[in-house]
Amino acid sequence: MENKRRQFMKLSSISALGLLGGSVFSANSETTFKDSAYLKSNSSLFNMSGYRAPKLEEVRIGFIGLGMRGPGAVQRMSMIEGVTIKGLCDLREESVMKSKDILMGTKHKPDLYFGSAYAWKEMVDRDDIDLIYILTPWDWHTPMAVYAMEAGKHVAVEVPAAKTLDEAWELVETSERTKKHCMMMENCCYDFFELLTLNMARQNYFGDIIHGEGAYIHNLLDLNFDKTNGYESMWRLEENASRNGNLYPTHGLGPVCQIMNINRGDQLDYLSSLSSADFNMQKLAKEKAMNDPFYSEYANRSFRGNMNTTMIKTKKGRSIMIQHDVSSDRPYSRIHMISGTKAFAQKWPTPGKIAVNDKWLGESEMKTIEKKYTPELVKKVGELAKKIGGHGGMDFIMDWRLIDCLRNGLPLDQDVYDAALWSSITPLSEKSVANRSNSIDIPDFTRGNWKTNTPVDIGLQGAGNTSVNYKSGAKSSQIGL
């Protein structure tokens, strides 16, 4: 029964791609979109970097995907003033009802959509929604985002925004043509130490940035094989059983790219990627198949290697190392390391720390650094974000910042070029791994505009006027206008 359900999900995903008319998508092969006259022209339709969309006094949101991350996003958004949650959508009715229950006692009275693989289209087609918030399995990210932009909606989409280069280009072309934001929700860009180091880099504390490192090292072995409490229709296990590369680069890459002004003063040039062998996944699949026929189809599959290491060179000569391992028995780490001509920063496995002249700063010196360089964004909502939660508060900072920018007509911290570029590392790393780690050129999704685009501004000039209502037991907190 469950195997039939997984097959249905696969077929539904493929069918959904066909709903997009002339758009071409393929998860497993290159298509002709990247060779179109549009791309050969080597010029953008409209530069979305720094784009200020018309202000939205009220941001009306529709959510698609209410499984693992969806309910948390609904709860966080419900507390932000100027937000109205208009729709909740998931394939499963029970998931929709759980998120509906989260909103009990609030002003939000969303319409509910469920029971069909295409129920989301009905919600997206409404004319009283401004933002579609996508938290579905990866296959659906680009089709839903493109459809939503074509329907006149801004898009916030979970990572990765695209699985293939063609999908990445489709996001860029659609965002430029419709002038709708497409933000990939890379929440790690809003973690506290990452924001601190970004602000320090903006003020030249590190000098010239030489090298950066990031990672997603997270033991998900048991969760990926969990058919009861794991991922819908085993979709994440399927990803690991059909692709070999860095499948999840953006958590480590995003913060480093912002610090290096990638897409806004520098650009990724080429990469080389190496994967180890798989020492754990097929072994576990065989063990499980001995006692449960559900896992039989995985027993002889070839899984991605435990550890992938991808090295990237930028146009201006900087280097980046990104690692990915979700199947080894080791502690969680995202690394986040920045090396400059004047100073050095590192977080994971230890708390964030700074070094100058080869020496780590002491506790009192770190407090001085934090006092001086903590950005206004964190000063505004940081403490409240820690109370509300979402990966320690960074999810709430991301959500609040998104809404505050939309309400004030400001550029978003992450645009469609970031979504496309950061996501493209996965298919490019697959190509490199399959070709003995040979270097692979990285597309310039800005088509040369990176040379003049301005760096991300995380200040609150012209913003910061979005209030928050938060209640915890008998206590309540509010940041106001």
Image (cartoon, grey):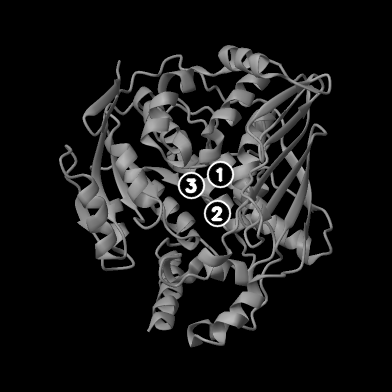
Q: CA distance from mark 3 to mark 2?
A: 13 Å
Q: Is residue 211 in sight in this rendering?
A: yes
- Which residue corresponds to mark 2? 162
Instruction: Identify the element where label 3 is drawn.
Output: helix
Q: Amino acid at mark 2?
A: Ala
Instruction: Identify the element where label 1 is drawn.
Output: helix
Please report the residue visible at 72 percent of the width from the left and 19 percent of the height from the top.
361
Asked if the residues shown at circle 2 and circle 1 are in contact, with their CB atoms under 8 angstroms apart, the answer is: yes
Residue 300 location (% of width, % of height) = 65, 83
Please report the residue visible at 41 percent of the width from the left and 30 percent of the height from the top.
385
Sequence-first disc among 2 and 1 = 2
Q: Nearer the viewer, mark 3 or mark 1?
A: 1
Sequence-first disc among 3 and 1 = 3
Instruction: Identify the element where label 2 is drawn.
Output: loop
Q: For residue 367, what is the image quadrant?
A: top right
Q: Amino acid at mark 3?
A: Thr
Residue 274 location (% of width, % of height) = 79, 58
